[in-house]
Each structure stands twice: as C-alpha cells, then as structure tokens.
C-alpha cells in the first residue's frame, strides 16, 4: 500500500515509541534523535501496525482520534466512516480486542472525540474513558455488558455546540464549544461548575495543566489561557467561580511579526503544554500556523508577559506539533510525510 498523508501523532509515556496515523495505517517510530537531516532530526521508523479491517465485511477501517489506553497496551480510536463505533486495539496481539457501538444511545450525533479518564491516564490500568459529541458527554466502561458500554452521560436538551474536551489529572473535564464558551465539570453526569464566556470564536482544542489551575484553548487565530483557581483554594472545576471568573489571557502574534515574517491566513494547530516536563510543571506552550512554529514562555505568561514568544520558520507545514517526551527543549513536528524533531 502506498503511503498516505500523516494526520495525527501521539507519544507513549512508558516506552520509547511514537504512533503516527498515516492514511488508514498507524506507523510506529522510535521516539529518539536519529539521522540528523538539514537541521531536523527524524525519528526512526520501526514498523506499521496491520491494517484494521471490519470483521464482517473485510473493509479497511480508517482510524481517527488515536488514544493510548490501559497502561499503553491498547490503542483506542474512532472509525472514520462510522461515528458510532469505537475500536479497542490490542497493541501486544496486533488485533482488535473489542468494539463499542453507540448508535442506540447517541443516534446520528455519534462520537466526536474520546480521551482517557484522566490526563496522562494512558500510563495507568484505568479501564474507563470519556467521550463527547456536540450535545453530550459520557463515560464508557468496557467492563459493562452492553453494546455501547456507556456508564454515565450528560445530554443537553438545548444545543451547547460542544467542540472538544480534555481531562485534568484528577478526572475533571474542560469542554470547549463552537461559540467560544468553555465549560468546567467536576465529573461526567453533573452540571458544569463554571461556564467561561470566552471571546466568541470557536474553540478547536483544549488542554488542562497538570495542576488543574489553567485551561489552554486554541482558536483559529489566537490562544486563550484561563486561570481556574479561586480565592478559597478550589478550582473552577469543583467550585462555581461566579464573580471570580477571570479575564482570559489572549495569546496572539503581534501585527509587526505577522508583517515581518509574511505570515498569511493564521490557522493555529492545537496548542500544547510541555506536559512531560521534568520540572514537574509546564513551562512552555507550542503551536504552529502554516510553516511557522510558535512557542510561548508559560512562566512569563503567568506573570502577565504575553508577548514572549519565538517564531521559527520550517521547511514544511506541520499537521501536529508537541514537545518531545522528556525533552523540554525539543519539539516533535509531524508534517504530511515526515516525523522529526526541532530544537
């Protein structure tokens, strides 16, 4: 089979591997610095996983939304052609371990995203994971004896236009929406503790800091950083912020830098913290637009300095960018054909 285009990348935390979705194929790389080429160090390709086929029809399944799970022994992903099917793929056996079918429970809306029960939960033996669509969020428990395995859900009667989700280290949830709002939940099944108004632009991705004190949201042309800590020592995930709702910190490229670098049509890829930092807390944020990689100094942002960022022109347009595992100074950049490291 000819190579397709790279679409997603995720890193293992317990072993030296990176998984890249290339067309319908998941490729496996050694997540270390090898083969320096033109100032970009490429990851070493090891193998690709067998094509995943429908057991009844034999048709090739097109994965999307890859998520390492259950001690990184399995890979969860959605079926690109069927919004109501979640695949649980056993990485050790190289085959489908289970499927979850949500049509009866979720109808035509299906699933838009799944994430681990808690941030970095891929390293634990936790079985549960979370899912969402435009009007609902839910917990899936593979141990249940039902087709959908949905244990708890929180459907909305009105349309909240939910667009993306992320979990905290304690299992709290942040959900972005197409109207720019961000909702903070202590757990699935409960009402939102806090509704943050945002600035009105669609939220494409969200992430929660490891201490739960910050929510990072990506829109097309800017990033938002929202502090969640209240004066009583609780966060907006567990306590209604009310009058303590903060003004979000808006991160954007200055007009003079846009002109200097001839940047056109800003469209940020999902921004990420350096989640794997050995320092124990995040210090940087990375995103990209077109062929430009942008990193912000998170420590300075927390002090109100919003314009401390670096712009680096690349030779390609990334489809994904994230800090490399245990290497805060290096960024794993995935373009349509190559997976490499930028210092």
Image: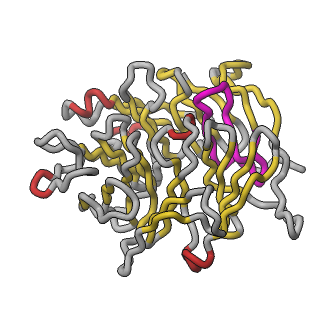
Confirm whether residue 255 shows in the render: no
Q: Where does residue 34 sit, x and y in percent of width and height?
A: 71, 19
Q: Where does residue 278 sit, x and y in percent of width and height?
A: 44, 19
Residue, x 17% and y 53% (percent of image)? 241
Main secondary structure type of the part rendered in magenta: strand
Q: Nearer the viewer, residue 295 or 84?
A: 84
Residue, x 90% and y 50% (percent of image)? 1
- Answer left or right for 143 relative to 295: right
Position of residue 80 relative to residue 255, above or below, is below
Q: Where does residue 342 sit, x and y in percent of width and height?
A: 57, 26
Position of residue 306 relative to residue 191, above or below, is above
- Answer left or right for 200 relative to 51: left
Confirm whether residue 328 shows in the render: yes
Residue, x 54% and y 51% (percent of image)? 128
- Is residue 102 one of those drawn in magenta? no
Quadrant occupied by the C terminus: top right
Residue, x 59% and y 64% (percent of image)? 149
Q: Nearer the viewer, residue 135 or 99?
A: 99
Q: Where does residue 247 sit, x and y in percent of width and height?
A: 18, 50
- Is residue 7 one of those drawn in magenta? yes
User: Looking at the image, how many numbered discs can be counted on the residues?
Assistant: 0
Write the start and end of the magenta stretch as one range: 5-27
């Amino acid at each position: 089979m000819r190579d397709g285009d790279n679409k997603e990348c995720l890193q293992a935390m317990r072993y030296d591997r990176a998984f890249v979705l290339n067309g319908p194929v998941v490729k496996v790389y050694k997540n270390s610095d090898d083969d320096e080429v033109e100032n970009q160090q490429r990851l070493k390709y090891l193998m690709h996983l067998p094509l995943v086929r429908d057991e009844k029809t034999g048709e090739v399944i097109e994965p999307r939304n890859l998520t390492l799970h259950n001690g990184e022994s399995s890979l969860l992903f959605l079926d690109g052609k069927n919004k109501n099917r979640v695949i649980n793929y056993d990485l050790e056996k190289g085959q489908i371990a289970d499927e979850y079918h949500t049509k009866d429970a979720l109808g035509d809306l299906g699933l838009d995203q799944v994430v681990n029960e808690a941030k970095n939960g891929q390293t634990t033996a936790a079985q549960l994971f979370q899912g969402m669509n435009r009007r609902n969020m839910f917990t899936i428990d593979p141990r249940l004896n039902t087709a959908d395995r949905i244990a708890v859900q929180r459907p909305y009667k009105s349309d909240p236009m939910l667009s993306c989700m992320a979990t905290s280290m304690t299992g709290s949830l942040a959900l972005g929406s197409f109207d720019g709002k961000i909702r903070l939940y202590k757990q699935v099944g409960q009402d939102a503790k806090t509704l943050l108004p945002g600035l009105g632009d669609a939220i494409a991705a969200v992430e929660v800091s490891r201490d739960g004190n910050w929510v990072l949201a990506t829109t097309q042309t800017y990033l938002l950083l929202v502090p969640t800590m209240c004066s009583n020592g609780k966060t907006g995930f567990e306590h209604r912020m009310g009058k303590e709702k903060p003004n979000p910190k808006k991160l954007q490229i200055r007009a003079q830098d846009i002109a200097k670098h001839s940047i056109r049509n800003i469209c940020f890829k999902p921004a990420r913290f350096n989640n794997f930092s050995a320092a124990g807390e995040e210090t940087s944020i990375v995103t990209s637009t077109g062929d430009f990689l942008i990193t912000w100094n998170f420590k300075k942002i927390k002090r109100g300095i919003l314009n401390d960022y670096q712009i680096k022109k690349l030779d390609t347009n990334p489809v994904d960018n994230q800090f490399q595992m245990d290497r805060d100074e290096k960024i794993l950049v995935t373009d349509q054909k190559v997976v490499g490291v930028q210092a």
